[in-house]
Image (tube, rainbow, N blue to C red):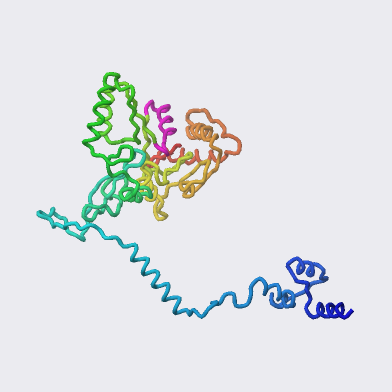
Amino acid sequence: MDDVSHKAKREDVCPSKKLDRATVEAQLAQTSGPEYWRSLEELAGSPEFQDMLHREFPKGASEWVDSFSRRGFLQLMGASLALAGMTGCTKLPLEPIVPYVRQPEDVIPGRPMFFATAVTLSGYGSPVLVESHLGRPTKIEGNDKHPASLGGTDIFTQASILGMYDPDRSQTITHLGDVNSWAEFVKQVKGPLAVQKGLGGAGIRILTQTISSPSLADQLRAFLKLYPQARWHVYEPVNRDNVLEGAKMAFGQPVETRYDFSKADVIVSLDADFLYAGYPGNTRYIRDFASRRNPDAPMSRFYAIESTPTSTGAKADHRFPIRATEIETVARALTDLSLPQTGIHKQPPEAMGFLRSIADDLWKCRHCRRSPTASGS
């Protein structure tokens, strides 16, 4: 009997019931009417809640468990970092440094040199000026003397300098992973070429990117003339094959259309992102387009009709979103409305009443000093 009473007394002094999150939520759910607390500490002021927090975050858990001081910790970490730096040092082999016997003209260490060249993207060249230090190119800028860009560059041209320092770029001739020389390549390829000559090159395949160099293209044509059964394949991850196929349908040959936005009073773009980086001639188009957007001078008016939001459409005075399948319908209707002298007078498609205002602008500018320009997809 004494043991039972003693056990009951002990449970009253040290209750074994522990408070958890479910219990707290249950207590809050049983409250009636609004209750307010000035802080979370006041809400969690019960002994049970404090006991639960103590079990999750024991007192002194964030302190050092021994007598190790802050100064001693910093000393130990400083020594560890110093030793790690010493292990990373490698002794390079001794190499003689020989000065110029005849120093090249105009080569002065510390003073950059500039030379004009061009970088290509998908076969289209961009004229640039390259800054170099002791023969190493370090910066690319536009060539303001060249009419194709007037000194402008895009993001791809600026980033092309990184290709010179790409660690994965092939710097030598390799065969099955082993470094070889050009002489060894010529020696090894002579035998297979002699065999293929009797077959007309039926087993030869050449894979290149788009080539716009006349000299390299002439060399490839001469090779294909010598091996008429060989095949030359051209591949670009991002290409303009659809544009070239459209040009074949319209002009009978793959040609690129050139625009002169500096002479256009009205510009109508049909799903053409001509101000975007990577578009052929975009650096010149940006300069010409900006020259006619001066509010203190006669400004051009720009209509953008596109199926996808583009950076070019964001600069338009009037932008009209339509489906990609409706581009041809819009082009035909706009042509009919812009030529009232033909007597066709077709009505624009439903929900495309904006075409009439565009056609009126084009018709009014037929006798302007500058001719209107329409860019197509």
Displayed quadrant of residue 248: top left
Displayed quadrant of residue 265: top left
Q: Quadrant of the C terminus?
A: top left
Using the image, determine if residue 259 lies above or below residue 202.
below
The residue lying at 16 percent from left, 57 percent from top is 96
Q: Quadrant of the N terminus?
A: bottom right
In the rendered image, residue 164, in percent from the top left (x then y), is placed at 30, 49
In the rendered image, residue 144, in percent from the top left (x then y), is placed at 28, 50
The residue lying at 79 percent from left, 80 percent from top is 13
The residue closer to the viewer here, 227 or 203, is: 203
Q: Is residue 45 magenta?
A: no
The residue closer to the viewer here, 145 or 230, is: 230
Q: Which residues are magenta?
A: 236-253
Residue sitting farthest toward the top: 198
Answer whether residue 371 is visible to the viewer in this image.
yes
The residue lying at 39 percent from left, 69 percent from top is 81
Using the image, determine if residue 335 lies above or below residue 290.
above
Predominant secondary structure in magenta? helix
The residue closer to the viewer here, 323 or 193, is: 193
In the rendered image, residue 273, in percent from the top left (x then y), is placed at 45, 43
The residue closer to the viewer here, 216 or 16, is: 16
In the rendered image, residue 51, in percent from the top left (x then y), is placed at 71, 75
